Image (cartoon, rainbow, N blue to C red):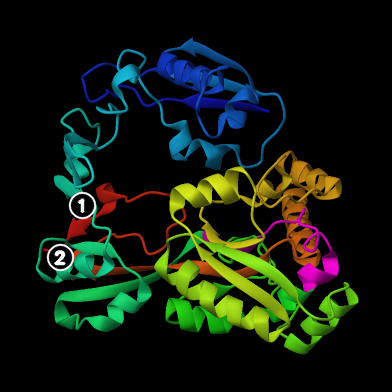
């Protein structure tokens, strides 16, 4: 319930102002304020008090225990800001980290340079870094091969199109991206467990991974990352069985099949290509699928906000986000008080053992309820120029840790 932090002394913001406990107090109180736009506001409203007995000590007392609290403070939503520069952070961010903003060309690039104020700049091997925004995957690879970029994330199929030669190596890791067949659980037909079970039995995960992701991806049977220590392999809860799927559909009252729409966002591989495969699999099991390709604004409005959909396909990339199934009015429309109770017990557990048991129980509940069509975990595939060291293989956070990178001598 009580966390005491001892802050590093002599730390400065990029504008030269001192970092101390008052900045922590200001930031966390702002994050919890009534008009806060912080997307993880609940983490900060759970802080009962913030004490700053001296400039280098912060004491946080929680209202309820949170087993993930330290991990949550390591995410971007808990970045500490200076009250004097906070108002300009949207266009001119001022932090205490190793790199400061040098130039920002919207839609094109962000250029960072080593901050003279950084407390450990002697150990920074990379002095400047440019992040380029190139939407087209083929163009990204072409830029890489031309020598203008040193590493890039690429769709899996793009790698097959280029001869990388001896200049590059491929990093194959994992992400927090659970790719699911999102299901509207309040839809008249989809509210029936047997219909959702029929969908689960119709899905051939490996066929989707091979066909849409060129073999990159890890099958999942619930909304949980396989790299997490509390992961349970539930892929055999409803094994691939089209005939079983047809039988369940008939038992649910749809002996002549069931018409459903599948709204797909503009993601070429897992959504658009994967959607074609999923639709074919469902039709083989007796469903009749109408595919609707939509842009992101329409997807966010119709699917995510208004919950006006039957099925969709999307990757949920936030770390440790199984608790989204306990949210009111979330777009899955899944309402299960017993699940909510288990999630709350996991989040407020006082020992790792209890937390682990509850997280496993929650995974099994989602799998048995076939809340969504659980398909696969997104892979993290990067092409890196040889000599560049320290690139993260796995994407467990939304971080590109340039400060840990270096060029081989």
Whether residue 12 sits left or right of residue 60 in the image: it is left
Whether residue 197 sits left or right of residue 281 in the image: it is right
Report the front residue among 105 and 393.
105
Residue appearing at x 57%, y 48% in the figure: 302
Residue appearing at x 15%, y 64% in the figure: 408
- Disc 2 and disc 1: Cα gap in Å? 10 Å
Give residue 318's position: percent from left, percent from top.
Answer: 52, 50
Q: Which residue lies most toward the bottom here?
A: 243
What residue span does the magenta drawing correspond to? Answer: 177-197
Give residue 349's position: percent from left, percent from top.
Answer: 75, 42
- The residue under label 1 is 132
Report the front residue among 38 and 390.
38
Q: How many marks?
A: 2
> Dot 1, how many residues are within 10 Å of its Cα: few (below 14), some (14-19), or many (20+)?
some
Q: Residue 257 lies in what quarter of the image?
A: bottom right
Residue 187 part of the magenta-drawn span? yes
Which SS class for mark 2? helix
The C terminus appears in which quarter of the rendering? bottom left
347 above or below 222?
A: above
Q: Residue 277 lies in what quarter of the image?
A: bottom right
Residue appearing at x 27%, y 23% in the figure: 13
Residue 313: mark in rendering: none
- The residue under label 2 is 143
């Amino acid at each position: 319930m009580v966390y005491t932090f001892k802050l590093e002394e002599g730390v400065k913001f990029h504008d030269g102002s001192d970092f101390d406990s008052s900045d922590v107090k200001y930031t966390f109180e702002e994050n919890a304020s009534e008009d806060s736009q912080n997307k993880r506001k609940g983490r900060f409203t759970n802080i009962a008090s913030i004490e700053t007995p001296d400039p280098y000590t912060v004491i946080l007392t929680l209202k309820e225990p949170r087993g993930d609290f330290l991990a949550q403070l390591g995410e971007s939503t808990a970045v500490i800001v200076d009250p004097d520069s906070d108002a300009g952070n949207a266009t001119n961010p001022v932090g205490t980290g190793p790199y400061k903003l040098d130039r920002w060309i919207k839609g094109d690039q962000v250029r960072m340079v080593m901050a003279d104020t950084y407390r450990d700049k002697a150990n920074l091997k990379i002095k400047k870094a440019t992040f380029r925004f190139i939407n087209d995957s083929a163009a990204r690879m072409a830029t890489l091969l031309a020598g203008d970029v040193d590493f890039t994330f690429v769709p899996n199929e793009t790698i097959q199109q280029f001869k990388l030669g001896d200049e590059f190596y491929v990093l194959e890791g994992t992400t927090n991206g659970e790719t699911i067949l999102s299901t509207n659980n309040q839809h008249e037909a989809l509210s029936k467990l047997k219909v959702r079970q029929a969908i689960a039995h119709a899905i051939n995960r490996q066929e989707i991974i091979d066909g849409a992701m060129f073999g990159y991806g890890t099958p999942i049977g619930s909304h949980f990352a396989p790299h997490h220590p509390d992961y349970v392999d539930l892929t055999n809860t409803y094994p691939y069985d089209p005939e079983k799927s047809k039988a369940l559909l008939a038992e649910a009252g749809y002996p002549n099949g069931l018409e459903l729409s599948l709204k797909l966002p503009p993601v070429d591989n897992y959504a658009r290509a994967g959607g074609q495969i999923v639709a074919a699999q469902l039709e083989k099991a007796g469903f009749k699928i109408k595919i609707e390709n939509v842009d992101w604004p329409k997807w966010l409005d119709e699917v995510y906000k208004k919950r006006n959909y039957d099925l969709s396909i999307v990757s949920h990339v936030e770390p440790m986000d199984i608790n989204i199934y306990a949210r009111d009015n979330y777009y899955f429309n899944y309402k299960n008080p017993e699940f909510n109770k288990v999630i709350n017990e996991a989040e407020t557990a006082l020992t790792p053992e209890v937390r682990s048991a509850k997280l496993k129980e929650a995974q099994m509940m989602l799998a048995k309820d076939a809340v969504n069509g659980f398909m696969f975990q997104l892979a993290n595939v990067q092409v890196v120029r040889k000599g560049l060291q320290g690139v993260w293989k796995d994407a467990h956070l939304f971080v590109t840790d340039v400060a840990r990178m270096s060029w081989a001598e």
